[in-house]
Amino acid sequence: MNGMEELSKEISYALRHAPWEYDLEMDEDGWVPVIQLLSALHVSEKWKDVDENSLIEMIIKSKKKRHEIKNGKIRAFYGHSIPIKIVKDEKCPPNTLYHGTARRYLDSIKEKGLLPQNRQYVHLSQDIETARNVGKRHDDRPIILLINAKKAYEDGIKFYYGNEKVWLADIVPNKYITE
Ligand code: HQG
């Protein structure tokens, strides 16, 4: 893993899962002051030279757009598991979205639909390749599920924009999912 990717992972952990471990004061939209995050990172020898420009460079260079910086604050776009739910803006999804998952989860998903499990939202992918990469984190031969997102949206299921590859939903009932 290169330095930037490692930094992106550490910051994702802080902003998605454990702001309290880093003494971060997070608002309801998930923003924290950059200065607070930098002071927390500087405790570690590894990150002692990281400054706001390094964070901007990390965001630009990262293959995945996980974070954004605005007005002296930084936040993660998606992936949160913290107890306070980050309020996302609802948005009309494309007709079809994809979800890459493990073969071993299939029976349960067919029965209960897609559930957020440990995160705040179910994560869906904009394209098949992204879904395959997400699924490979759980299974070397992942299953790609097709989500009839537009129909679900028309029926009242809420969708939210994560980044250009990631969509979020509260839940996806099984009737909108096919293999
Ligand atoms: C599964 C990464 C059984 C679900 C990725 C998934 C993504 C069920 C697992 C983002 C289920 C949760 C999130 C049910 C869902 N029964 N299993 N009813 N409903 N599941 O890691 O979507 O690199 O929390 O299929 O790119 O894999 O970190 O979610 O396999 O966008 O930026 O429960 O994380 O982004 O796994 O990945 P995860 P995910 P980053």
Image (cartoon, helix red, strand yellow):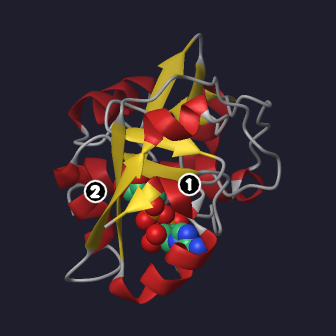
Asked whether residue 46 appears in the rendered view, the answer is no
Instruction: Classify 10 Å Cα crowding around label 2: few (below 14), some (14-19), many (20 and above).
Output: many
Residue pictured at 32% horizontal, 38% vertical:
165
The spot of residue 40 in percent (x, y) is 63, 47
Helix, strand, or loop for circle 2? Answer: helix
The picture quadrant where one finds residue 139 is bottom left
Asked whether residue 171 appears in the rendered view, the answer is yes
In this picture, is 12 found above or below 151? Answer: below
Relative side of 22 to 92, left or right: right
The picture quadrant where one finds residue 86 is top right
Q: Residue furthest top?
A: 71
The spot of residue 116 in percent (x, y) is 62, 61
Helix, strand, or loop for circle 1? Answer: strand
Q: Nearer the viewer, residue 87 or 11?
A: 87
In this picture, is 53 found above or below 122? Answer: above
Q: Nearer the viewer, residue 144 or 77?
A: 144
The spot of residue 113 in percent (x, y) is 58, 66
Q: Quadrant of the N terminus?
A: bottom left
Q: Which residue is mark 1?
A: 122
Relative side of 162 to 169, left or right: left
In this picture, is 105 found above or below 162? Answer: below
Amino acid type for the residue under numbered disc 1: Val
Residue pictured at 17% horizontal, 53% vertical:
129
Q: Quadrant of the C terminus?
A: bottom left
Q: How far apart in space, not on screen, are marks 1 and 2 (Cα)?
A: 13 Å
Q: Which residue is mark 2?
A: 131
Ligand 1: does it lie within 8 Å of the C-beta at label 2?
no
- Mark 1 and mark 2 lie on one chain; the one further toward the N terminus is 1
Q: Nearer the viewer, residue 76 or 25?
A: 76
